[in-house]
Image (spheres, rainbow, N blue to C red):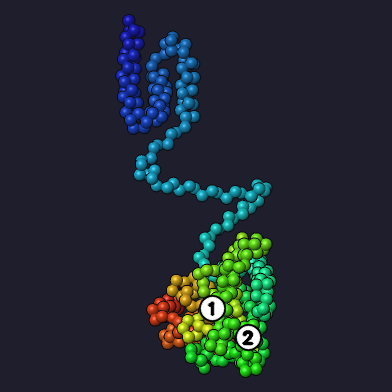
Amino acid sequence: MAEFSQKRGKRHDDNVLGSAVDFLLANARLVLGVGGAAVLGIATLAVKRLIDRATSPRDEDDTKGDTTCLEDSWKELSLLKSTPCLQSRSPPAVLSQPMLLPAPLPSAPEGPADADPQPSPQLSSPAPLCLTFQEKLLVFERDHVTIPVSHVALAKQLAGDIALELQAYLQSKFPELPFGALVPGGPLYDGLQAGASYHVRLLAPLVLEPGLWSLVPGTDTVARDPRCWAVRRTQLEFHPRGSSPWDRFLVGGYLSSRVLLELLRKALAASVNWPAIGSLLGCLIQPSVASEELLLEVQHEQLELTVAVLLAVRGADAEDRLLRACPLEGLAGNLWLQDLYPTEAARLRALDDHDVGTRRRLLLLLCSVCRGHPALGRLGRAHLTQVVLRLGEEEVDWAEEALGERFLQALELLISSLERASLPCHFNPSVNLFDSLREEEIDDMGYALYLGLQAPEGLL
């Protein structure tokens, strides 16, 4: 009876303790979750059994299963040790934050164990590059001005082939008109080409009979235009009208550039089989309809080329003036515009060759900057050439290290010229190249250049 009472009391204590454990586990499930409650339950039961066996008297049943129970308890404890600890769930606010991964440890070099450990190199962040304006200008030149040599060779090849085809066409279409050899030239041939669009000048010279023609300055005509010259027919009393094949293009006793332009424009647009020529040369050739000049637009898979066909007359005097037909307005419509491009290009080349200077590079930089600026697009190669020529004659230091300083001086000279609304031609000071600009255009360009002078990096 006493033994039964002892066992009953033991069961009562077990029930009380079991109820407490169940209550603890139930609350632990709410706090720790299912995984945490399971771990806590295993630990609690294992400890409870160890305490019971240490405090309760030993009986036969306990003696028989002592070894088994102890083994089960140690198994439970071993299970507790091997159970991975579950990571508690982070609150939503923490999950929204980026996790910082630990930096990987540098791997130790393979070698003997007693070798001295090598100190890990300290990786310092690279310092930000602070380029000077000179350096930024050279980077701009490399990225936006310099053109591949292969493209230059291809453009020259296409221009030469087009010149041969056009020469053959003129001889077959107008056999009575003596044209000279069509020679391609221009910025592409003089090292003055910048940007992705290539420009070629294709001169079509008229062969005039010596003694039958003379050049008259534009200032001596009714147009009073210092830019132009008139080609007058002479010796009419000894060589009447009709003696020269060019007499049919006379207007008022002068060889009309406008009539010749219209004749050649219609021929190039309607009579030349450009699709066949383009297919033969591996490109697409189309005459430009929008432009008043004689332009051929050439599209190749590698580049785009613009060929300007220029009807030209060369003077027989010692100065060897070059006149070209240009669509002019008003009373100067029949006159010939004096072409100073060959003279200007030759002068720049001679100056650079004398001191290994960078005048032509400065001109290319200015052309690229103005071409890509919305307010400076009206400043063409002719305007910028006068600025570089003036600086080239005055300044001494034209080394590459002074290119940035020369660039800023060119901006200052342009601003002062726009303030006076005057940019004299270097080889003909009576010609003002700003005469064709409106006052609003001059103000816009002057303001843009003033801002560019304050922060020249913004122009690049």
Amino acid type of the residue tagged 1 in the rendering: Arg
Q: Nearer the viewer, residue 77 or 272?
A: 272
- Where, quadrant-wise, is the N terminus in this rendering? top left
User: Picture coordinates of residue 455 (x, y %)?
Assistant: 44, 75
Picture layout, residue 126 above or below residue 315: above
User: Picture coordinates of residue 237 (x, y %)?
Assistant: 62, 94
In the image, which disc is placed on residue 381?
A: 1
Report which residue position mark 2 lands on: 242
Residue lying furthest top:
1
Q: Pointers 2 and 1 in contact (CB under 8 A)?
A: no
Residue pictured at 52% horizontal, 79% vertical: 327
Q: Is residue 319 visible?
A: no
Amino acid type of the residue tagged 2 in the rendering: Gly
In the image, which disc is placed on residue 217?
A: none
**Element type where label 1 sits in the image:** helix
Residue pictured at 51% horizontal, 65% vertical: 127
Residue pictured at 34% horizontal, 23% vertical: 21
Residue pictured at 47% horizontal, 81% vertical: 329
